[in-house]
Structures are given as C-alpha cells and as structure tokens.
Image (cartoon, coloured by chain):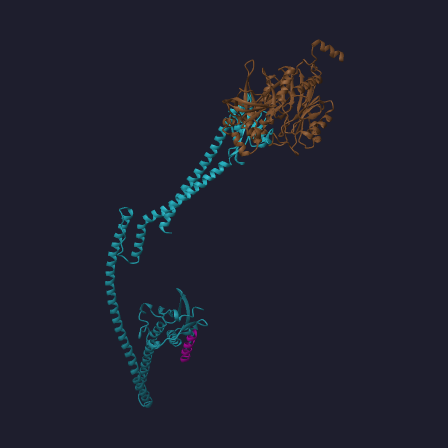
Amino acid sequence: MKLFWRVFLAATVSFTVILGAAAVLLVAGIRAEIEGDLYEHNRIATEHLSVAIERGAADQQWPFEALSNTARSQDFLFWFIVTPEDRVFLSDKAARYGAAPRDLYPSVPKELPPGTYEHSDKKNGLGIIIQRLNVRGEEWQLWLGFSTGEALRESRKAAAVIACIFLLSLLVFAVAAYYTTSRYLKPLSALARGAELIGAGSLSHRVSAGSGDELALLAGSFNAMAESLDRRTAERQLAEAELNRYKEHLEALVKERTAELERVNSELEAFTYSASHDLKAPIRRVEGFLSLVESDLAGKVPAVTADYIGRARKACGQMNSVIENLLKLSRISHCEVSLAETDLCALARAALEGRRAADPGRRAELVSPERLPVRGDAGLLAEAIENLIGNAWKFTSLTPAAVIELGVAKEGGENVYFVRDNGVGFDAAGAEGLFKPFKRFHSGPDYKGTGIGLSIVKRIIERHGGRVWAVSSPGRGAAFYFTLGQAASGGGLRA
Amino acid sequence: MAALLACALLATGLPPVAAQGPGSKTRVGTGRSSSADPAKAAAEAVAEALRGGGGKTDFAILLANSGGAYLEAALKEVSRLLGGGTPVYGGTSDSRGLLTDKGFIYGTTTIGYGFEPPGPEKALALMTVSSRDILFGTGYAEFSAAVTPREGTRRALLMAVKNANQPAKRRPRAALITPSYSDEEAVLGAMKDFFGAEVPVVGGTAGGPVFGIIGGGRVFVRGVSVALIYTDLPVGMISETGFKPRDIKSGIITSLEVDGSKTIIRGIDNRPAWTVYNEWLKNGPENVLKERGNLGAVTDYTALNPLFRQLSGPAGQIYYIYNHPLVDQATLKDKAFYVYARFRRGDRIQLTSGSWESVLNTIWSAPSLARNRAGITKPVFSFGYICAGLLGSIPEAEREKVHPLMLEAARGAPFLSGFAWGEEGMYPGIGNRHVNQTVTFITIGEK
C-alpha cells in the first residue's frame, strides 16, 4: 500500500474514531439531558399542581384546567389523584376511577421514600412522578405519568443530526486530509520517483528541494546522494572500460595463442599421422624383405645371423605396432563419436576371450555383473576396454590366481566405472605421466607393450566427456577408474 | 293510638315528625336505567333503589331526561312497583342525563336544551326514602288559564301540608319544588305568601323541550310539584355558582319588556343590549353563532358569561344572583336578549365570567358546603339540581369528574341530581330566588 494511502487512512480512521466517540458521548449526553429535562418539566408540573390542589383543598377549588392542560403535553400518559385508601379518586380517564394505581402500574413500589418520588420504568418507556398531597389533613398523592419514549425519539433525532454532522465532518476531513496528504507527500513522491529513475539508471535526475522543511533537507540529501552515485558510477564505468580493454586484449592474446597452439598441434598431429603413415610402408617393406631373407637363408646362415634377422623382424613388428597405435591415437582424436547403448561387460568378456585365445595357458577370472549398459561409442569403448583388460591381463601374468574385475560405483551422484586387477600394481606416486604416450612403469619380456594404450584409453574417455584415473601400489594390483560424462553414462548403475 | 297522638299534640303544640331514638333509621336507595322501554327502565330503577333502600319506601323522587309518554309510562310503572300510596315527586331533567351516587346515567352526552331524545337515548333515575325521622308532604298543581301559577302554587302547598298531616302554621324544614319553565318567580312568590320567606327551597325548573312535572301520580306540562320536608334531622342547603363577578363590565338597564315570565332586556346604557353584551365579550357570542350556526352553542357560551345582580342581606351578606342571557330569532333581530328573572329598569347588571374549572369546583363544593352549614358529619342523602347550562359548559371529557367529586362531597351517601333549566334556592336574609347557572342542594344528615 502506498504511503499516501497509509497516511490518509490512518488520519481518517483516527478522526473517525475520535469524532465517533465524541458523537456517541454527545448523543448519550443529549439523551440524558432530554430525559432530565423531561423529568424536571414533569416534576415542576407536579409541584405546581400539588401546590394548587393543596391550596384549593380547604374550599374545594382544585386546578382542573391545569390538570386537563397537563394532559395536552406531548409526553403525557396519565395523572391520578390517589386517596389515602390507595384508590384513584380522579384521573384524566374516568375508567381509572376507583382503581388501585399499583394494579395499573405494578412496577411502582408500595413504600415510597420521603419527598417527591420519581419512578422510571425504562422497560415500558414510562416515567412517573408521585407527589404527596396534604388534603384536609390527610395524605393523598398526585401521580403524573409520562412517556420517556419522546425523549428517546428526540435523542434519536439528535443522534441523526449528529450523525449527519459527523458524516459531513468526515467528508470535509477526508477531502482536507487528501489534499494535505497529497501536498505534504508530493516531495516524498518526487523522491520515490527520483529513486526509481536513479535505480533505472537516470543518475542525472534531481528532485526539487522545495521550502526549507525536513522534506527539503531530505531532498537535498537525496540529490547529494544521487550526485555521489553519479560520480562513482562514472568512475566505475571508466574502470570497467579499462578492465574490458584489458580483457579484450587478453582474450585476443589467448585466442592468438590458442590458434597458434592448435595450429602447432594440428601440424604435430599431421606430422605424427604422416610420419606414422609414411613410416608404416617402409617398415612393412623391411619386414617383408626380412621375411624373404629369413626364408631364403633358412639353414644357410649361422644361427646368430638367423637370430639377428629374427630380432630385426620383431623390431619391425614392434615398430609397426607402435605406428598402428599412434595412428589409432590420431584417429581417435578426430573420429566422430556415435552414442548408443553399449554393454561394458560384453566388451570386457570379448576382450578377455581374445586374450585367452592368444594365450590359452593363462588363467584369469573376470568378475563383473551380468550387464553394465552405458551410452557411448561402441567402437571406441571396445578399444578402451580392450586396452584396460589387456593391461590387467598383462600385469597379472605372474599372479597365480588372477582376477580381473569390472564394475561401477556411485560417487557424488556420478557413475564411476572401474577395471581392477590383483596384478603387480605400480607406485602411484610416480603415476603422473601414466596416461602420456610411451610412459611405461614395467619393462621386460613379461610386460611387453607400446606405451600408448593408456593414452588411447584417456583420449577415448575424454571424447566421451569423462575422465580417467588410476589407483595402485606395487604388488597390490591396480584399479583404473573412469567416468563417461552425462551424455555417455546413460546406463547408470544397475549392478 | 289516635288518643296518644292527640295528647302529644296538645303537649307540644306541634306533632313530632318522627319518633326519635336508637331505633330510628333512614334508608335511602337510588336506582337508574337507560332503557328506552319506560316499563323496563322503571323496573330496573326501582329494583336498584329498593336494594339500597331496604326494600321499602315512604317517598320517591323520579327524574327523567325525557317527558311525554315515556315519563308517563315510567311513572305509572314506578307507582305500581312502589305501591299506589307512595308519593312520587319529580319531573324532567335536561336531555343530557342524570346523576346519582352510582354515576352518570346519560341520555345523550352532547345535546341539551332544546333536544328531546326521539329514540333510545333515555335516562331515568329514582331515589327512594324510607324513614321514621323524615316526613314528606307532597302536593301539586297544574296551571291553566283558570289557575294562575300563584293560585296553583298555593293549592299545591295546601295539599302538601295536608298530605304531611302537619298544621299549616308549622313550617317545613325545606321544600323541594319543580316549577314549569318560566313560572318560577310566580311560584316563589306564592310560597313566600304561604310560608313567609323562611322556608328554604331547593328547586329545579323542569327541563324541556317536552316538559314534564310529576305530581299526584300524573305527569303534566305546566304547573308545580312540591315536596315539603319535615324532620328534626340536620338539614343543610346551598345555592352556589362557579362564577366570579367582574365589575369592570357593567351597565344600567335602560329598556326592558316583561313578556310573561321572560324579561326581555332591550337596552343597556341606552344602547342595544345584545350589542353591549357582545362588546363586553369582544363579540364572542356573535362569533360562536357564526361559527357554530345554532343557538344552542350560543346558549352554552353565554352560560359561562352570565349577568348578575348584587343583593345584600340584612346582616350584610352579599349575594350574586346570576341570570343566563338567552336569545331567540326574535330577540336577535331586535338586538336584545332575555332572562327568566325579574329585572327592573335602572337595575345595574354586571358581566361575570367563569370557566369549566370553576363550575366543576362549584358542583363539588356545593354539597360539602350544604353539609358543613348544618354541621352534618354523616349525611343520609343529598338531592339537588345542577344547572343544565353549567353541565354544558364543562367539556365532555371532563364531565365524568362530576360523579367522583360529588360522591366525595356526599361522603359516599346516596344522592340524586337533575340538570335543571332554572334553579331556585335560598339566600339567607334575602329569601328564595330564582336563578340560573347555579347548583342548589339539600343534604340531610344523621343527628
């Protein structure tokens, strides 16, 4: 609710409550006064009549006309002259002659206090004044009954008039309050509007200071604040512009460096590919020729020569593998990734079967769930699993009861897949370059390899938006963990 | 028994009215009826009166608001029911009604004077008295060309004395009279001739327009009925009015004309009398005539503004004799008015005025004054006449007050009052006078 309406309503409600209370008190006072006047009027009338009756008692000259005139008053109900035997001697109505007055008005007590008695019967809107009379030495009574309903009607009229005045006053007050509140809150409205404009960015906006009251001071303070804000904003904008210039320069620099890096990387990859491709054919030819030499010279050359030729052929084969892997790594970096549901367990079982077929004498157990579906490129994931299973197969070759485990665990709401073995393990402290090409932790005839497999795994996992890491210690097996990112790990953990 | 009575008469010179002693008792009853059937009305009134009167009566007063055949039939039935020998005195009252200790009995509440109830608006009231202490002697006379009012009254008085079985020289304590309208002065003159000026009269002129006077078991229109009262019981009488003289409005009668019992006043201070009277009242009577259009309304108005003559008694008493100014078409044409009283050229007449309040208080106070004058503490009964004009001057809404006031004044004893067209009363030191606008009452009390 706007301040204007709050101030206006508060003033109007306060005025209404105060004026209403005053009106109620006034009406109550008027009613009491009207009733008081009514009783006073009738008491005076009763006293006058009583005096006239008592004076006339000796010679029977009673004020019948005055009694009759009493009956003409607007609020008159009855008059009785009551005998000492408590019977109505005379009344304004002949039908009441001889009646017991308290039979007609039972609310009047039998025993009356000394002096003039004023009886009020609010339930019936009735007032009775009873005056004792000395009639020829006997105690008679004059009863004068009147309706207090007229007082009520008069007070209602007064209440109606007061209500009209009240409403009129309220209307006048409301108009005045509206005008005054508008006038005094206009500077505040201007301030509010100014604050809105400044909040919207019009920092040059200023409000009128007006005459020298508190609102003018407030307007002055507001303008000073706006001035300060305007100045500081200008300074900040200057600083931001400077910063932007630095940022743009930095971005340009980064872009330039990135482009250069990409260019170098591309050139390097192109070089790697070309070199690998270009190296592959000569090596095949060397191996081919070495094969021909070996078959031509079989049995014709000394064993040492034959061994040299054999080693040369093996070296060619190894180089060929390195080149193949390098080419593979290069292709993986550029190939398109096609996501589809792929069962990692099936891939693992296939990889292990391949190893078993190549080395039937080896025994290694695969522990895995029945299925481990993921969303990923089936070919790339098969290559990654092939390398990880191959790794485990290789490094458990000396383990009597080799166990290779494929599974998934939930970590921080993310599926973390793992391939774990109980092989020789390695020292994790030096595993920083584990996923770099040609990095090897074990050498020797038992652990042959090109040193590119884990690089291929890393590149494949990264192409899926995931990450890969290893946990191991020497003699206690190794565990390779990887994630596949949001898009590729749709299979979730079901094991 | 006759010998004993003769001895007593010789010893005292006068016969005792009644045996006195612890056994003496007076029983009075009143009855009333508004039945239009005169026989039924009589039966109701007699039954009620006899209940209060102990079932017997020596004397009865019968008043009715209507004369003619109704009163004749009623009287016949009353006489039959009371026994043929019971003397019945009375006559017609004003058509407005009658008053007893039991309350008003209305004929019609609004119309008086010239109104004769044609239909059911009948009112009849009866008082019966049975007493060893009071002796009533009744007489009557019907006036005619051959019997003048004076002669007729003399005859009636002789009859009454005879019926009371009293010597002529014994004066009764009081006389009730019902003279015919306009014969009052002659009747009073005859009474003065008969008894002297000392026998007080309580009289009420029969109301009309169909006048009826009861006497000798008959109803007649013109004449007089008399009831003489002999008793040793205290007797109080009063003749009062409710008006106060205003000497600032007075004049000398300079022209008048006597027409039978009427005195037509034609001139006051050598000007037309009706014009002078209207000037005194700021043209009030003429205004009433214009506004109301009937002479009855004028009569009610003038009832509260009567004229009076001042009389002085030998002991210095001052009395005001009121007369009700009346008009008819003939006097209006001559700008004159008439009264039923004897005025002479050169008399000073004064205007007086009253109010219904003063009238009401007078009606209330009159029986009390009568009682007090005689030192009566325990009234036996009261009887009298209230001027019909006075009753008419009291607003209808206030008339009901007359009954409780009179009952209080009578100390609850039985009373009967008619509303007369003229009143006759005693003014001590002056004698009996025919007046208007007056309440005249007699009260008899126990010793």
Q: What shade does chain A have?
A: cyan
Q: In which quarter of the image is the N terminus of chain B?
A: top right
Left or right, A416 with respect to B289, comes to left
Magenta segment main secondary structure: helix
Judge whether residue A349 is colored magenta.
yes
Q: Quadrant of residue B153?
A: top right
Question: Horizontally, is A247 left or right of B294 in the view?
Answer: left
Whether residue A116 appears in this view of the structure is no
B293 over A425 or under it: above or below: above
- Using the rendered image of the protein, determine whether residue B211 is visible from the camera's viewpoint: yes
Report the residue at 69% width, 10% height from top.
B13
Question: Can you say whether A324 is above or below A242 in the image?
Answer: below
Assess whether residue B193 is covered by the magenta stretch: no
**Segment tinted magenta in the rendering:** A345-361
- In the image, taking residue B218 as reference, residue A336 lies left or right, namely left
In this image, B90 relative to A251: left or right?
right
Between B228 and A245, the one lying in front of the other is B228
Q: Looking at the picture, how far across and down is residue A45, in whole percent?
A: 50, 29
The residue sitting at the top extreme is B11
Where does the image place residue B146, in percent across and percent down from the top left? 68, 22
Q: In which quarter of the image is the C terminus of chain B?
A: top right
Q: Position of residue B348 (x, y in %)?
A: 52, 20
The location of residue A379, given as percent across then percent down, is 39, 77
| Chain B painted colour | brown
**Closest to the observer: B52 or A88?**
B52
Hey, which quadrant is residue A268 in on the image?
Answer: bottom left
Q: Residue at x 56, y 28 (%)?
A: B331
